[in-house]
Image (spheres, rainbow, N blue to C red):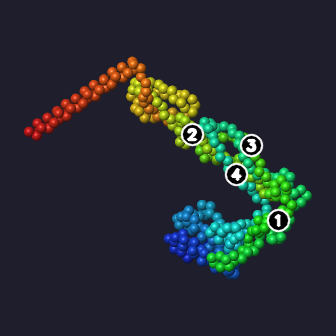
Amino acid sequence: MSTTRRDYYEILGLSKGASAEEIKKAFRKKAKACHPDTNKSPDAEAQFKELGEAYDVLSDANKRQVYDNYGHDGLKSGGYQPQWDFAEGFPDLGDIFASFFGGGAGYGGQRRRGGPQQGNDLRLDLQLEFNDAVFGTKQEITFTHLENCDPCQGSGSAAGSGPSVCTTCGGQGQVRQTAQTIIGHFTQIVTCPNCQGSGSIIVNPCAQCKGQGRTAVETKRSIVIPPGVDQGTRLRVAGEGDAGIKGGPPGDLYVVLQIKPHPEFKRDGYHVYSLQEVPYAIMALGGEVEVNTLEGPQPIKIPAGTQNGHIFNLKALGVPHLNNSSKRGDHYVEVQVEIPTQLSGEEKKLLQKLGELQQERSKKGRIHQSASIVGKLKEAFAGGA
């Protein structure tokens, strides 16, 4: 075949505006004809590789957009790699359909699992106090994970015995199975149902782990919470997941942080927001009040005539940036007029006097406004005459 890369739409026999369903249908139609299991042409492997790459790209909205805009070079620069490693052998057709269309176990969807396997990752949700999330802390966590069984050293077999070769697959971990697919009958190599792909079975299981090779163990660890973490931050604790199988490495533990709300502060990213009530006299005449911050009480100056709802910005008194605690957000304080619920006799008299003065000023303002309007009307009528 020519080494020139063909257009993916041309390979599938489609136009550029083809729908996702049309792309899937075209791939299904061409798969049987191109696959080396049914096509003995010397070019069959290369043809199916080309077909698989075309479908892999055009069935993925993001890859397709890159390809439509920039072609093969755009995919290459974006780090695109084919879905299969053809250098290790051409995959079975069942594997292809399992990969593209969600095929399950027993139809090429599982590979042999005879060798070491990495253990599972685990998740632990941890609640933190608001200030601990801001400034960081050390926390002791308790969790349960799987560790290698001590009596059998992870083998699953009782002392003095070992696993036996699986009689179903002869130690291969795989068996041949004929399946009916949407494009005909195909013989597939599938995971052995007896040994689950390991190629061996435990005939004399360990009494401690019941042949599993691993046991559940409750573990305590001390972890460091860095300053600036937020709701949903994931901290990775390497090697604290489940132990691997047959000498495989352990998984990791991911601690997901849940931050308790603060009764006074609200957080948005690295900024903090709060409300501060200020006596009406200070709002009108000006003065100084103390406000609570993450660093403790801080004084702020209230200029005379400050309006209700005004926001003051306290620079660099917010949350430290994660992984860069020398940089901090700001603290925004919104002031609100404090309305007293109880007044002394003298306060009532002063307020009544203040109210009278304000009413008088308002009345004078209305009289002045009325006089101005009358004057303008007179001028208008005089001009009309």
Compared with 378, 69 (above or below) is below
Q: Residue at x 73, y 70 (%)?
A: 190
Q: Which residue is mark 4?
A: 122
Mark sitting earlier along the chain (4/2): 4
Outermost residue toward the bottom?
Answer: 40
Residue 266 rendering spot, x and y as whole percentages: 53, 39
Left-right relation of 193 to 354: right
Residue 45 in picture, x, y percent from top left? 68, 75
Report the residue marked by disc 3.
220
In the image, 61 versus 176, the foreground residue is 176
Amino acid under label 1? Ser
**Residue at the image position 76 percent from the left and 65 percent from the top:** 196
Give, as a three-letter code, the residue at label 2: Pro
Q: Which mark is residue 261?
A: 2
User: Which of the 4 image quadrants contains residue 176?
Assistant: bottom right
What residue is shown at x 73% (from left), y 75% (from top)? 177
Q: Sequence order check: which comes first, mark 3 or mark 4?
A: 4
Which residue in the rendered view is the most extreme toward the left? 385
Q: Residue 8, located in which quarter of the rendered image?
A: bottom right
Residue 24 coordinates in the image, percent (x, y): 57, 72
- Mark 4 residue element: strand
